[in-house]
Amino acid sequence: MKLLSFLSLKRISGQIAALVVVSIVAIHLIITATFLIHRPDQPDLSIDRGHSQLAAAVQLLAAAPATERPRLFADIARTFPQLNLESLPAGPVPAATQTDGLDLRILHRRLGNSYRIFSMSRGEESRKIGIALPDRTMVSATIQTDQWQRPFWSGPWMTTLLFALTSFTLLGLWAARALTAPLSSFAKAAESFSLNGAAAPLPERGPEEIRSVAKALNRMRERITTLIDDRTKMLAAISHDLRTPITRMRLRSEFIEDDAHRSRMLGDLDQMRSMLESVLSFLRNDRKLESMTLVDVATTLQLVTDQFADMGHKVAYDGPEHAMATVRPDDLHRSVTNLVENAVRFGAEATIRLLVSPDTVTIEVEDDGPGISDARKEIMLEPFVRGDDARNMDEAAGFGLGLSIARSIVLAHGGELSLNDRQPHGLIVRIELPVRQQIRQSAA
């Protein structure tokens, strides 16, 4: 039963075994058909190696009178020197012998039974034969051999070999593609995996093992999506429930007579509320509720610049007046706002720069603060990670979600976010977004 299961065509092992068997049978059929058509074991009768010329000369000598034969020998020697036709001394006629390696059927067919052919000597490139005429006169001639043989590379075996190699190569490429195509689709699905349900499930096709893996991965994606949904709903419910006691505590704090205690209590409550809103914003961004649309990115950046300028911060915009790109407008506004908040928090001035190319929109938020060390640039993009000592002013400075939210928004757009040093000091946060994207409605 295990052997039958191993050889099942539904499994990869069975398909490989069937491919090998079919290939072996196919190559045997090709070789057999080629052998039967070309018959390399039979001499090629289309190459007579001068047999026709020799037969005509011998018949001419046999028909001529004995007195004319010397003249004919001379004429034949001048006309067909390669035959080396000569007269043999009179004597008993040898018995007909087999000429090894030569097929003289054309010569026999042309001369007839009244002529007798016998072997005399052999050489490397020619063989000498004797021919007895009907009147028992004997002549000798040389038959060319090797110089008329067909070269190996023009024979049927080389053609068969090339055909077999080509067939095996094409068959191997097809088989490799057929067996690896599902694995390639797994890799693409893993790269495009998202929690909003926009990515299509893995195709459940191919051998049985591939289908089993695809089903398992699809079930895993469903469980992960369900887990994230439950997490978001739970935290949203906790946040909603916490807002009520925070509001009551804020109202009660207003009755504290000590101004210093009342101010500290209200500050702590504001920090708690801000923390809840930041966490919910981070979780909502995972779900990407907003749809993609064509937006003037330059106008959005100018709006963020004006908002911070109205609050008394030194923020400038450097870029074109208009630049269109397919983005999620609210998410883009939120990500740039988070970056500018960090810039004005740790620096005196900030600049929002926009660079446009045919395929990419680059947004840079530059500040003159202390910057971030190279060792912490990567970890700073993780959620709930605050800056190093140079950027960690106090406990109320932030919750470590600004950069992570901005990064998740950029990744959802198919872009990249990187942290770069500014000379002589400061930080440049660079966002690169594709100009054109497939506009689709995200799952709610």
Image: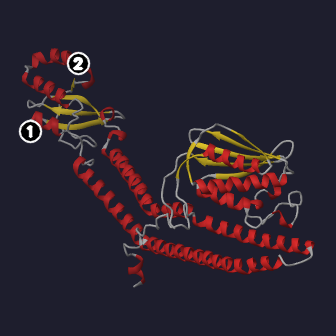
Above-or-below relation of 337 to 399: above
* Image x and y of residue 45, in percent: 20, 39
**Is 46 or 422 nearer to us in this picture?**
422
Above-or-below relation of 126 to 289: above
At x 56%, y 46%, the residue is 325
State the quadrant of the N terminus: bottom left
* Image x and y of residue 398, in percent: 80, 64
* Image x and y of residue 184, in percent: 50, 60
**Is 208 or 164 nearer to us in this picture?**
208
Give SS at disc 2.
helix
393 relative to 97 in the view: left or right: right
Sequence-wise, which precedes: disc 2 or disc 1?
A: 2
Residue picked out by circle 1: 113
Q: What residue type is labelled 1?
A: Asn
At x 63%, y 53%, the residue is 332
Mark 2 nearby-residue class (10 Å; few <14, some 14–19, many ≥20): some
The span from disc 2 to disc 1 (Cα, nearest Å) is: 25 Å
Residue picked out by circle 2: 77
Q: Is residue 93 visible?
A: no
Evaluate if marks 2 and 1 touch, with contact meaning CB atoms under 8 Å apart.
Answer: no
Q: What residue type is labelled 2?
A: Ala
* Image x and y of residue 149, in percent: 31, 36
At x 56%, y 61%, the residue is 191
Above-or-below relation of 132 to 74: below
409 relative to 349 in the view: left or right: left
193 relative to 139 in the view: left or right: right
Figure disc tally: 2
At x 25%, y 40%, the residue is 102
**Is 397 or 310 nearer to us in this picture?**
310
